[in-house]
Image: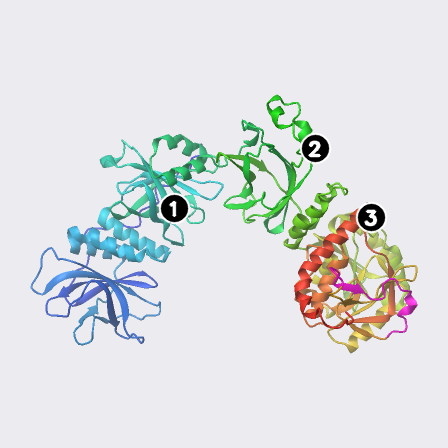
Amino acid sequence: MLVTEQSPAVTNPTVVKPGATRAMRPGRVIGCRVDQTTLLIIGLGRVLAGEVVAGDVMVGVDGDQEGTRRAFVSQWRLPARSPSTKHGFAALLPQDGTDNALTAMQFGEEETGARYTFAPRLASAEEAAAILAESAGPQSAAVIDGLVDVLMAGNLSLRRLLTITAFLQAAHANDGFIELIGESHEGTTFLQGWSRGMAPGPCRMSVVGTPSSAASQCAIAVFPRPDAPDGAPGFVGLIEAGLAARPRDIEGLVFRGRAGWRYAAAHPRKRIIGPLETPEHVRSILPRVHGTPDVLLLLRAVANSFAGEETVSSLPFPVRMGIDNMFEADGGKLLASGWLYDPDAHVTAVRLRRRNGAARLDEGWTRLDRPDVTNSFNDQQHFAPSTQGAQHAHGFIAHAQLPSEDHGAPVYFELTLRDSRRAFLPVRPTQLSACLAAWRQIGSIDPASCALPAIVDEQIVPFLSQSRRSALVTDATLDAGCFDQESGTPIVIGVGEGEENISPLLALLALDPETRRAPIVIVMPAERFRRQAARLKELVRFYRLSARLVSANGAGDFYDMLEAGTQGLSCETVVSLSASLVPRAKGWYGKLLATAATLKGSIISPVLAYEDHSIRWAGNWIDNDNGDELFVGRYAGYPLKAVTEMKLTRIAAASLECCVMPRDALLCAGGFAGGYLGVQKKGLDLGLRLSRSGIDSYLLPSVQMWGCDEAREGDSSAMAALVEEIDRKIFTSQWSPALAGEKHRQKRPA
């Protein structure tokens, strides 16, 4: 068992020294600042003055612009009553944090109330506690208990808790110690120690050691402790996740026991056990404790919690589980696939857990047939009675969201069975981008599977839609030529893994007088940069171009690289160009820039065509009556001559594969979305967001670029169609609500 000790240098917050008290005088009150919102006032009631009554009392303070305030007042009889005083009192006065030094106050009405002046110096919490203990004598415990009742209501600051601790120690000294603190993977904190005032059952408490907390419930059970002073019982307690401080920071526990509020300090040599050891420790002490049924059930649940080991395979009935893939994307989004063999329905719930986060999987997963799982158990004799049926839907695919702050915390499956016991299967997720995780998952599924549509709709699309894009990092640059000396508008070329050779594009740029002297930024994925940067640098020098080669870590396609390439520029305007495109003729660069000069702050795109002179893209229009396809291609598939005579046309979304645009447009729009597997809908998504943000877009038909549709190497036509379907559903889910208001409008160019 891992044991950690705390240095004895940790001291209790209240040690009242002899002679630390201050004299109380009739007509004068002593103030003590509890925290920024509350002032404690201690004084003596005078015989010839107005009455100071107990309970909620209206109090007026000199200089208070808002009139009177309501204060809580507690009273006690003085042990030695003098002719001029009849009782002592303590009042909790609310403050707003802006009060100046107080000089006088009055209890009750102006004519009949009792007026007092403040002592010139505020007392510390320790001094105030000593004054109360000395003045109230045997009644101090009841007085302090009433004050603590009021102070424990609402949010508690650390300063307020330390003041409460000072009062409780003055009245009762320490009521026991916390000797052991245990952590759990689910966030519950386990406490063990002894205390005279602790009672079994739910206990109202607050942990001293957190900067801010609120009074909450702690489940308490007790057990015999022959070694504790005065026959005090031992106790074990459970604090629910999120309410306790880190074990090393816990200084004590303020709790309401059998006879009022008490304080149990953490022992200077307290033991701290980790989440792997806590379940075993709780199991060892469980037979000795007694408490309410609810508390005992909670303790049994902790005893049966995850201890770092796989326990599914040791179950005495036919329940087994295996994981094929477990991917984790940014933000704690997980995508899991595997199988659960449970032919007799022993399992009632399946959860994926990390620390105090849990996701119920069996309510939303997608099941698929896995006859291989059934066949693997045919030879196991004790499973034979359960394998006679025709049930093969043992496979599953599910997505989940778990806390991502602590990646070092273990991730595990939790199976809850019909008899309330739990079994565990630890897993180690592979860290990937959301898109790459989805690619690997759908690549492992048989395209002919009847479950594929449900997997796409229920798992892949929600997983991608809710995932954040990976951060782009420019990790290396390499200049060739006189890049910094060129003054033209930069051309940002994105080179994805699909474009194996960009030599023809560089040659055409070198042959065009307008682009020969333009600064060129060539952005590549980090792996491709490592392989080809040196060769591309020599090629740029051969063509006498001026280029900057950029390595973008985390980039997956042209749009990612376009964003990474523009981040390092300081110019006003950039020209984007996918490496899969080539100009149809010279002069395209000048025409785009000349048009952009007349339409400041706009985006201008050329027509994109295939090499057979058919149109690939020439604008879209919104069509909400066309099923799930919100945008219908304009002139797509038409001969190129159908648009050559067209003039500059306003559109709603530019094609960013080739365009001239303001450099900060991508930043203003928040960059490209990270959930698309392909490039078509990903580019359209950003083009629409740019237009909706107030940046006008135009089509310039007099400029044409040749190219083809980008496809991942090795992908089949069935995979390409599946990717297109997934992206269409993601795009529709994102844009259908935004375009719903235009459903009944006339079709217009977009």
Q: Secondary structure at mark 2?
A: helix
Q: Report the colour scheme.
A: rainbow
Q: For the residues marked 1 and 3, what is the alpha-carbon distance in whole angstroms? A: 61 Å
Q: Which residue is mark 1?
A: 250
Q: Quadrant of the N terminus?
A: top left
Q: For the residues marked 3 and 2, what is the alpha-carbon distance in whole angstroms? A: 28 Å
Q: Is residue 293 left or right of residue 487?
A: left
Residue 56: x and y in percent read: 25, 64
Q: Which residue is mark 2?
A: 371
Q: Which residues are magenta?
A: 626-646
Q: Nearer the viewer, mark 3 or mark 2?
A: 2
Q: Is residue 405 left or right of residue 146?
A: right
Q: Tell me if residue 658 comes above or below residue 169 in the rendering.
A: below
**Residue 193 is at least partly visible in this image:** yes
Q: Tell me if residue 682 comes above or below residue 287 in the rendering.
A: below
Identify the disc placed on residue 635. none
Residue 706 lies within the magenta run: no
Query: Tag 3 or tag 1, which sits nearer the N-term?
Result: 1
Using the image as rendered, state which of residue 308 and residue 132 is in the foreground.
308
Q: Is residue 427 left or right of residue 137?
A: right
Q: Secondary structure at mark 3?
A: helix
Q: Which residue is mark 3?
A: 717
Using the image as rendered, state which of residue 543 and residue 673 is in the foreground.
673
**Residue contact at pointers 3 and 2, CB within 8 angstroms:** no
Q: For the residues marked 1 and 2, what is the alpha-carbon distance in whole angstroms? A: 53 Å
The kind of residue tagged 1 is Ile
Residue 523: x and y in percent read: 76, 56
Q: Nearer the viewer, mark 1 or mark 3?
A: 3
